[in-house]
Image (spheres, rainbow, N blue to C red):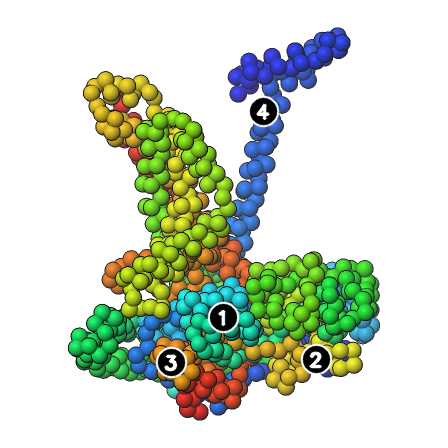
Amino acid sequence: MSAAAPPTSSPSPPPRPAKARLPRQRRRASGPAVALLARGEPWVWLTGGTLTVCLAMIVGLMLLVLYQGLVTFWPQPVVRMQLADGRTLMGEVTRREADRSQAPAAEAPAPPSQPTAAADPHRDLLRTGNFELTGAHFAWVDEADVKQRSQPRWALVVERVEWGRFYGLPLAILQDSQPLADARNLEGPAQEDACRQIYTLFEQYHQQARAQRQRVTDLETHQIGQLSRQLEESRLTIRQAELRFGLNSPQHQQAAAEAQALRAGIDKQLADLREEIQTLKAQNARVQLLLATADGRTKSLPLADVVRLYPANQLTLAGKLKVYLSRWWEFVSAWPREANSEGGVFPAIYGTVLMTLLMSIAVVPFGVMAALYLREYARGGWIVSLVRIAINNLAGVPSIVFGVFGLGFFCYIVGAGIDQLLFAAQLPNPTFGKGGLLWASLTLALLTLPVVIVATEEALAAVPRSMREGSYACGASKWQTVRRIVLPRAMPGIMTGAILAMARGAGEVAPLMLVGAAKLAPELPADAAFPFLHPQRSFMHLGFHIYDLGFQSQNSEAAKPMVFTTTLLLILLVALLNITAIRLRSRLRRRFVGNQF
Amino acid sequence: MSARKNLLGIALFAGLTLAAHAQVAVDPALPEYKPAEGVSGAIVSKGSDTMNNLMTLWAEGFKAIYPNITVEIEGKGSSTAPGALISGTANFGPMSRPMKQQEIDEFEKHFGYKPTQLSTSIDMLAVYVNKDNPIQGLTLPQVDAIFSKSRNLGYPQDLSRWGQLDLKGEWESAPIGLYGRNSASGTYGYFKEHTLGKGDFKDSVKEQPGSSSVVQGVASDRYAIGYSGIGYKTADVRAVPLALDASSPMVPAEPQNAYSGDYSLSRFLLLSVNYAPNSKIDPLRREFIRYIFSRQGQEAVLKDGYLPVSADVARQALQSVGIEPGF
């Protein structure tokens, strides 16, 4: 580096000084500082330093996300605190801060006798759970008010399907209200044994309960889902007949009669399924876990409602790791629950990937063809320059503008037109005339189009003129040259453009809020139901999910860590998409190198 | 109340209000939801951000019963609901404020009848301060003087420092940081109408995109004050007791006060639907509305931190869209 620097930077400093200062300059020129400057060493340091600052910022951000995202699911011990006022709280300490409330509290009409003995007064944010009993998920506890702090051996953390977490001590496990194991009215070792027995029994029954719950879900989503789809279809056929042939026309009446017959059969099947589900649910409700809260209230939980349960204060490192990994697995593979504040983000991952892929499929051919024309066919002139300027400006348009355009053009004009033509039976419920996967992909394709065009143009320009001339000399036409000589050569550069476009598209959120990303989209935009890809459905998106968790969540304290995990996931996903594309590119490059002669 | 407070110390105030929260329960007269046949289609809801989570919870519960319906929920503010109902892009419009006359007229112009608004649950609009803030309570004119530059409720002076509200120590010179909602929000409109006397907000109010971010702003800014639905309360903030004027008592934001009507900023959370009077409502909407006013639906209200409606209100709401309540 320093060897290459002198020729470019050394001539410039000496001629610049004024003539009057020549002697001083000469003296200085012999000094080490000027020599250093002349060799360009400081510039190396400056540029290197700038790079370091950039890297530090990026790495710092990544580390923050990584740290916050990774610690979120690690199980914490459960602490029981007895307070001076007689209340007892139990939960996980999630945050600690220096207590600044003491000073104003002393001046308020509060008691002056409060003994603030602690050297560094602090308070803990305790996640107390048990929302249906207390009406809050978290509570601040002042260190000065804690009389006794303990970690009960059998304190259980229960993650539930509904109502958030529960913290309690095991009392009994009941089957049809008969205790299978009972720790009530026991003391010392006997109680300990009973607790262990309850826990073992729980693990044994829980598997089965969860399996049955899963079965219920399967029945509901697949079987009932299919039947309801048939019903909906039959309703639509009637409506279509009505629209085409008129109300009470023979065709309409015939369709109605057919649908009636179909409906009777479906209703029968539905009733059977409902009954089966009821039976399963009743079976599931038979086994219940009886828990005591820290302040002595009891609560019974059906086992099937428990997602995960562990005695937090007894976990070994391996046990903690198991809980940790199982939480991560749930996070990436499960559906969200409780208005997105719990459960997983699977549909959001799915939606993000699918949307990005569709966008790439839309944007790459368009961008490449536009660039081909611009570079290979168009005659240079003011129009082409104007087009180039327009494309470059397009790259600077705020993304929300694209969102507004997508909503106005795709959803309200194109989509509504499609609805009028093809989906009149569903109206007034819009099919394409609202935000959906297709419109979101197309909007983002528009947004990333300049990236692809510019990258492709550069790649095409980098193909040596001699190669084209060689091709023409052999008698190839323009198109043959482009197709066989120029495009393969430019392919890696085009792929770079596509990668940049994908990275930009996957991380974009603002336009999606207008054209199809939803807080809750209970159906995947591509699934096993014909026609498999449903471009009209709205979808969940990781970026939008982050926004939703961060700004809309009711239980914002619990949602905050989820923001980081989701962010981490989004970054990983974008990285994964990029790496795949980069590998594809290097493969293309290798193939191309092999063809050289 | 005050005796207990002395015992606890101010720092535990958050915990205290929590303990004082008598457990609210769903009206026992409300029936368990019973599934009906022939429900299919799409629930598309556009409107209030305050009710965003509530709509999601209802939809999740409803979807568990009818797996094949599709659900889409968008919550960008109550003002988006009437437009979506008129254009037919949504079949439910959750709103945290009643429709304005202008919105009703627009709707009527389109359909020839008025939109129907169902009272689904009760929210208390709370004025939040940081958990460390020692303020005992505020009167509405004081709140007005804090948030508004017009001071339509007639407080004599502008309030911009906590010292003006008799707070001592470090609070005396601390400026009041203001957090509020953006203007599409029904909460914004309600607050403007009921506490500012339709006056204008100060320019220094930091407008937030969601109810939760108001609370988070107040949680992280020690000297801040903000307003948001009670459902978004966290342990980091405290809902200030409010009084109508200097002569009336301070009323804490607690369920019993909302039900009794003593808390001045309690409101119904509404669900607007397009229902032609005396017509037969389609099965999907009928069943979703029945679900909302069932035991399960009102439990979801509790889960989201709001207050369930009584059986009388539920009955009225069901009748207003031509559904036989059956309880």
**Is B314 located above or below residue A512 in the figure?**
below
Is the residue at mark 3 from the same chain as the one at mark 2?
yes
For the residue labelled by badge 3, is the local secondary structure a helix, a strand or a loop? Answer: loop
Answer whether residue B16 is visible to the viewer in this image: yes
Residue under numbered circle 1:
B106
Closer to the chain start, of discs 3 and 1, is 1
Closer to the chain start, of discs 2 and 1, is 1
Residue under numbered circle 2:
B251
State if disc 4 and disc 2 touch (CB < 8 Å).
Answer: no
Residue under numbered circle 3:
B281
Q: Which corner quadrant holds the C terminus of chain B?
A: bottom left
Q: Nearer the viewer, residue A528 or B155?
A: B155
Answer whether residue A293 is visible to the viewer in this image: no
Q: Determine the chain carrying the residue at label 1.
A: B
The amino acid beneath tag 3 is Ile
For the residue labelled by badge 2, is the local secondary structure a helix, a strand or a loop? Answer: loop
